[in-house]
Image (cartoon, rainbow, N blue to C red):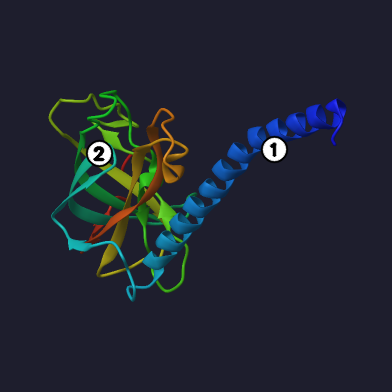
Amino acid sequence: MESLDDVIDAMIADRVIHRHRRKWLIAIALVVVLALVILAVGGWKQKVGRTVPTLTAPATVESGKWEYNVTKAEIRVRKAGEYTEAEAELRVYFDLKNIDEEEKKSDSLQGKFMVFVPGGGQEHVQSNGNTCRGELNWVLVYGLPPESCFTNFKVPADFTSDLVEIGILGERYESDEAVLGANDEPYWHNERPDAVVQLKPEVVDVTGEDR
């Protein structure tokens, strides 16, 4: 027959195990979600097996708290000067609307939500966010009409392409334990790919323009 001390020790051990079990389940769930995101993003490198829709601009995409109407792209070339090196950037134009029905908060678009997908096994390139009304990371208010915006991607000075692909990722409004069916407070996170938009870029010489 177990002594009282043994029973108390067993109860304490059971409580400790129960307390930490939930944390381990959360950690495992987050690792699984992260692995799925990595696999999905990696799928953009090759068209074979791509699980998100591939659209042709002009195209409208609802992703997370944002609605994008992607319209056109430019390869903006700046020739070398006496004291400057040649540069180029890929600029994508779009109308952006805040459709955050969950929190109805004002926000600006983060650079990680629009990526340039070079293909050929190369890593995708994050944008620098959104520029609207001439201001970088312009804050968009929920419920207002869309703003005309653009975003830039760094590319090599000699970059050329007849067709570029832009990946769009969106957050999900869910709790940390959504996979486990818990009822913790949800919030925007766990971004995943939602679409790829193809555009035929125009080459624009911007030598001499203000940076």
User: Residue 165's image quarter?
Assistant: bottom left
Tell me, yes or no, if residue 143 can be seen here.
yes
Q: Nearer the viewer, mark 2 or mark 1?
A: 1
Whole-percent x, y for residue 160 in the image: 33, 68
| Residue bearing mark 2 | 66
Q: In percent of the image, x 15 and y 25: which residue is there? A: 144
The quadrant the C terminus occupies is top left
Q: Are marks 2 and 1 in contact (CB under 8 Å)?
A: no
Left or right: residue 131 versus residue 145 is: right
Name the kind of residue labelled 1 in the image. Ile
The quadrant the N terminus occupies is top right
Q: Secondary structure at mark 1?
A: helix
User: What whole-number distance in Å separates the C-alpha atoms at marks 2 and 1?
Assistant: 42 Å
Left or right: residue 137 versus residue 98 is: right
Whole-percent x, y for residue 21 in the image: 63, 40
Whole-percent x, y for residue 129 in the image: 36, 40
| Residue bearing mark 1 | 17
